[in-house]
Image: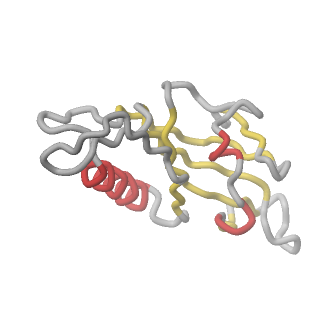
Amino acid sequence: MSLTRVVLTSGRSVDLAELRLSSTYGGMLAGYPCKPLNDLRIKALLRTAEHTFPTTPVHLVPPPREHPDQYAGALSPVEVLPPVACVGNFHSTALTPTHDPVLYRSTLTVIWFQPDPQVPSGCDADAGLRGLDWEELARDYEL
């Protein structure tokens, strides 16, 4: 059973099987949001997703990066990512037309950032998430 269904801009429906939400800057004890810190956070999310879903391809939806302060700090200028980091494992129908639709599905793990801790749904999901090129990024697997 899926948590929700997202309709991609291509028209393909994908089912969200697992979702992990975390605070983008949760646990940050010192410093401030900047490009080096954000890049480390993204790399950590990618490593965790690859470790958690080792047989599934992982894709990062490039996050928007805001620069609210014109002055550079000690490390670099302030750069802010959306406050909620998301890792979702999605499934859909098989990519390969010759695969038996009863025995095969396609899968992709996606990392994206969003402004609030809402579960993406239908056509109201994040535009970057809905714009996934599923046929290029996902992989078929046998049930």
Judge from the rendering whether residue 128 lies leftward or rightward of residue 22; answer left or right: right
Judge from the rendering whether residue 59 lies leftward or rightward of residue 47; answer left or right: right
Q: Position of residue 11 (x, y in %)?
A: 85, 48
Numbered disc total: 0
Name the one closer to the observer, 128 or 140: 128
Which residue is pictured at 63% across the width and 32% down the height?
A: 120
Which quadrant of the view contains residue 82? top left
Q: Is the N terminus in the top left, top right, bottom left or bottom right quadrant?
A: top right
Which residue is pictured at 37% across the width and 51% down the height?
A: 45
Which residue is pictured at 19% across the width and 35% down the height?
A: 28
Q: Position of residue 107 (x, y in %)?
A: 64, 58
Residue 130's place in the image compared with 57, above or below, is: above
Residue 74's place in the image compared with 118, above or below, is: below
Specify the farthest residue to the front.
70
Q: Position of residue 10 (x, y in %)?
A: 82, 53
Name the one closer to the observer, 48 or 29: 29
Q: Position of residue 59 (x, y in %)?
A: 54, 59
Name the one closer to the observer, 132 or 48: 132
